[in-house]
Amino acid sequence: MPREYTPGVRTVPPTAPRPAEPGRRPLDPTGPAVDPTGHEPAAADLARAAARAAADRLAPPAPVGLGDVVPAPERVEPDPAADFTLPADAAVRVSPDPAARDVAEQLADLLRPATGYPLPVTDAAPAAEGLALQLSAAPGETPGTVAAGVGLGPVAGPATPGPVAELGAEGYRLDVTPDAVRITAATPAGLLHGVQTLRQLLPPAVENPAPVAARWAVPGGVIVDRPRFPYRGAMLDVARHFFGVADVLRVIDHLARYKLNHLHLHLTDDQGWRIAVDGWPGLATVGGATQVGGGPGGAYTRADYRRIVSYAARRHVTVVPEIDLPGHTNAALTAYPQLAPDGVAPPPYTGTEVGFSYLDPDDERTYAFVADVLGEVAALTPGPWLHIGGDEAFKVPADAYARFVERAQGIVASTGKTVVGWHQIAPAGHADGRILQWWGTTGDDPATAEAVRRGARVILSPGNHAYLDMKYAPDTPIGHDWAGLVDVERAYRWDPGTHLAGVPADAVLGVEAPLWTESVTSLAEIEFMLLPRLPALAELGWSPRRTHDWASFRRRLAGHGPRWHTAGITFHPAPEIPWPTTGPTGLPSPRPASQPTTPTADLP
Ligand code: TNX
């Protein structure tokens, strides 16, 4: 039975106890960073200790400015005379549309714990008296659109502050005046993005899981905002190490916070098969029984997976399931050796090598298997995408590989989904709408460029910028470095619109930050690798290029340290970010949080 997850009430990341793995000691979420027995401290402890050390030095927050939002909004017009303060008797007023009402419920849920205010969600009243939070249908919109406004207090001025249609499928407009805050959007997704912006404009104390006394001020002015790219995502590898439903839900919350709208789940690999398939029950029971380093592994039941996709859908995040084919299939072959080229069951694999396993591309049983699996996963998945992997099938000859991919693409099409694959599938024939996910490090790949000329679009996950399993620095306790070190600046400094030779911006669907988990074993470690780099990728996917500015980004990002700390979220106190810090004197210090601060004689 998965643990129930209540957003925002944890101060200690929920790390499930795991059996000891060779060379590791069991993780203790509250335990010391230094093991008194003299063993190497577990990476999770190091991550937590680093985050704790940083958090202890965080200075009291500076007031938030209207432009202090990550990802940077398209247009910001501050009005310092128009600040708003949320009153204790505020209500959330919402139009009768159920999807808009659900966003209003989420807004109230986000604000209630820290404010302690009741924040009832009520129907919009055109002439609302008193202070209220209002989500009201904008007059004049055609029926069926979900134009709505979130207002705190009586909504002053025109009810429709601009043409809602221009905001597109995900944009929003936020109006803050002394009497009201209103969010307007053409869709519930846009409204929720506006809610995330409003959340960032409130003091960091809003992240408290329990009521705190604060003036809940929102800076005055107008934000008009919409994304640069339609696809903005992160990938979680649940195959190398298995993560339960509660961990995945928490990752979805992190995505939604930064307006990322896709969660790619890498569901199968050599070390584990993580989703139950009715027609092939051994995949989960046999193929899911271990993970890197040993340990019990695990797999999602159909109900677990449904819970993940519906939790994500409520946050306007689309789940992209990946069944990695034809390589990375050792776990499947342990359960169904008839699919192996030699028909012999391989032993379970708990190492981290790649490229040795594959389904027999010349056996029809392979295609019956692929059709069953993709058919079931497609039926469980509300989103439009189905990812077939395609990477590192080193043992499959090129012509057999291309034939396999072409048939797999056809099977995906027959499920009604659009196929996504790692960029290795480029040489296979084109399929309508197909998407290649670029994970190379060169910025130049003629096969991918040629596939784009034939009509493919690209999701950019360049290993040397977007791979969140890369170490930040040589001493990062977990992670890889085959694509180089990826500090926050490297994660931020590139342009998805020009990154890949021969792939014009209009062929770029968006960006995705993959987190492979060979060395990542707990939720705390997931968060340590995601934060603070995930917001960098989120800004590349969302914000207009003209806002791209490292100095501005690192300053805005710094304000999120106190938010994560208050919410009990682990993060890496990256030294290049000017976290608000206090030195030992208690005075604000400009020194990076991960470096020791020493009192100096000239400080008063
Ligand atoms: C390459 S990127 C892989 C994964 C590994 C990753 C580690 C890709 C499509 N394949 O199998 O986990 O490197 O960084």
Image: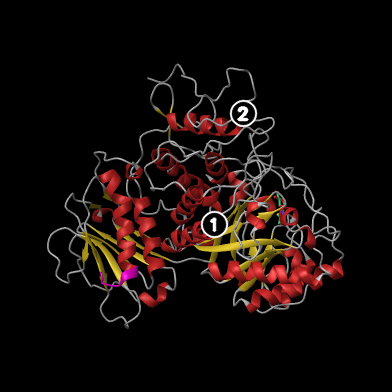
Direction from residue 179 to residue 363 in the image, left or right: right
Is disc 2 placed on a helix, strand or loop?
A: loop
The magenta stretch spans which residues?
95-99
Residue 276 painted magenta: no
67 shown above or below 33: below
User: Disc 2 residue type?
Assistant: Arg
| Dot 1 crowding, Cα within 10 Å, few <14, some 14–19, many 20+ | some
Q: Which residue is mark 2?
A: 25
352 shown above or below 475: below
Whole-percent x, y for residue 180 in the image: 22, 60
Q: Which residue is mark 1?
A: 301
| Dot 2 crowding, Cα within 10 Å, few <14, some 14–19, many 20+ | some
Residue appearing at x 66%, y 70% in the figure: 372
User: Disc 1 residue type?
Assistant: Thr
- The image quarter containing residue 167 is bottom left
Residue appearing at x 85%, y 67% in the figure: 398
Q: In terms of secondary structure, what is the magenta stretch mainly?
A: loop
Is the distance from the Cβ of mark 2 to the nearest ligand 1 atom less than 8 Å? no
Residue appearing at x 60%, y 40% in the figure: 521
246 shown above or below 121: above
Q: Nearer the viewer, mark 1 or mark 2?
A: 1
Residue 98 painted magenta: yes
Q: Which is more toward the observer, 266 or 333? A: 333
Q: Which is more toward the observer, 143 or 62? A: 143
Q: How is the image coloured?
A: secondary structure
Is disc 1 placed on a helix, strand or loop?
A: loop
Direction from residue 459 to residue 591 in the image, left or right: left
Q: CA distance from mark 1 to mark 2?
A: 29 Å
Whole-percent x, y for residue 211 in the image: 26, 40
Q: Is residue 458 visible?
A: no
Whole-percent x, y for residue 109 in the image: 31, 53
